Image: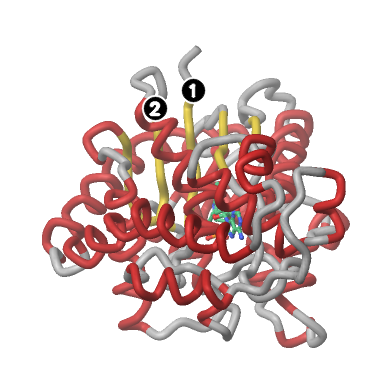
Amino acid sequence: MSKKIFSGVQPTGNLHLGNYLGAIKNFVDLNNDDENECIFCVVDLHAITTKQDKEQLRNNIRETAATFIASGIDPSKSIIFNQSKVHAHSEGSWMLSCMAPMGWLNRMTQFKEKAGKDKEKASVGLYIYPILMASDILLYDATHVPVGEDQKQHLELTRDIAQKFNKDFNCADFLKVPEPLIKKDFSRIMSLKDGLKKMSKSDPSDLSRINLTDTKDEITNKIKKAKTDSFPISNEKNKLKDRPEAENLLGIYSSISNQTLDKTLEEFDGKNFSDLKSQLAEILSSKISPISDEIKKLINEHKYLDELLEQGASKAEEIAGKKINEMKKIIGF
Ligand code: TYM
């Protein structure tokens, strides 16, 4: 069955292995299936929910588009654009904000994590950002949304908002209720320094993550320094629960090698972390450094990237513009 795929990535720099294994690698697989219609969005309006430097933001928008292409997304088979170019995203976000109860937003754990202790100082944008995300998805009648595990709650909210809109305005099936596509395994890649913390662009320690622009040497060094425990690797899967760093490294190895965790456990049963680390560094280098090289090449091609985003935006505008006009009519404008 053909799927309408929509997903987004924030251009906030330091795209990392978590973004790749949790999301972008799946974008590539979905894009390779000719049956699917794919839209990949550089969500720059989401990025400004926290303070951004103007020049850096501009570079990060290009770098995110470059990362999509360097990772293997074929721009001739998908729409790649940046969110701020298509007005409908903000308009839709406002209209949906007016129907989403605050109680639903108050449950969003990511806001609590990102706002930290001083919620009063967090921007209103950060609080309502899941509604902008719902607008992104619903404007394109997306049937499937590939994301990492950390976005699960936002997708549940998107589904609830779609259903409430359809009910409130008595327009059954107008907003399509999307299915999340979250990999059963390895959809939450953890920090290399703390197996209980998500790998994140905002972690102050660069050693906590493999950036998609890291060189072979940087990858090898980071894997060498990754936290482990002092026991040998065992093939007993249930024991991994208490060994988060071991579980994470074995998960990364499995995911990047496209094999099950069971197979990886069999491969490393009784071995030391030094064996796992040297093989992991090798396979990561072989898969990530070609992407890194390509990003570094593409990032200087401003004209190419800007034109690509411009063309993507005009295609996206056609789809989203139609939907927003229908939405306005339904509301009564
Ligand atoms: P963002 O930019 O934080 O992350 C982009 C994608 O990477 C995934 N991801 C991870 N997956 C596994 N392990 C990790 N450590 C990890 N870190 C990040 C995220 O789950 C995500 O899929 N709100 C979204 C962007 C967005 C969006 C959308 C996504 C805006 N509109 C519409 C889908 C559809 C975000 O901030 O992702």
Label 1: few (<14), some (14–19) or many (≥20) C-alpha neighbours in 10 Å = some
Amino acid at circle 1? Lys
Name the quarter where the C terminus is drawn.
Answer: top right
Label 2: few (<14), some (14–19) or many (≥20) C-alpha neighbours in 10 Å = some
Residue at figure coordinates x 31%, y 43% from the top left: 72
> In front here: 272 or 146?
272
Is 306 on the left or on the right of 141, as rendered? left
Quarter of the render that holds ligand 1? bottom right
> Marks 1 and 2: CB-CB under 8 Å?
yes
**Residue bearing mark 2:** 37
Amino acid at circle 2? Glu
Is 54 on the left or on the right of 5, as rendered? left
Residue at figure coordinates x 55%, y 44% from the top left: 255
Residue 21, position as x, y percentages in the image: 52, 49
Residue 68, position as x, y percentages in the image: 34, 51
> In front here: 177 or 235?
235
Is 21 on the left or on the right of 96, as rendered? left
**Residue bearing mark 1:** 3
Q: How many badges with numbers are in the image?
A: 2
> In front here: 38 or 330?
38
Can residue 166 be spotted in the picture? yes
> In front here: 8 or 203?
203
Residue at figure coordinates x 72%, y 67% from the top left: 195
Residue 318, position as x, y percentages in the image: 33, 36
Can residue 331 be spotted in the picture? no
Above or below — where is 331 with respect to 222? above
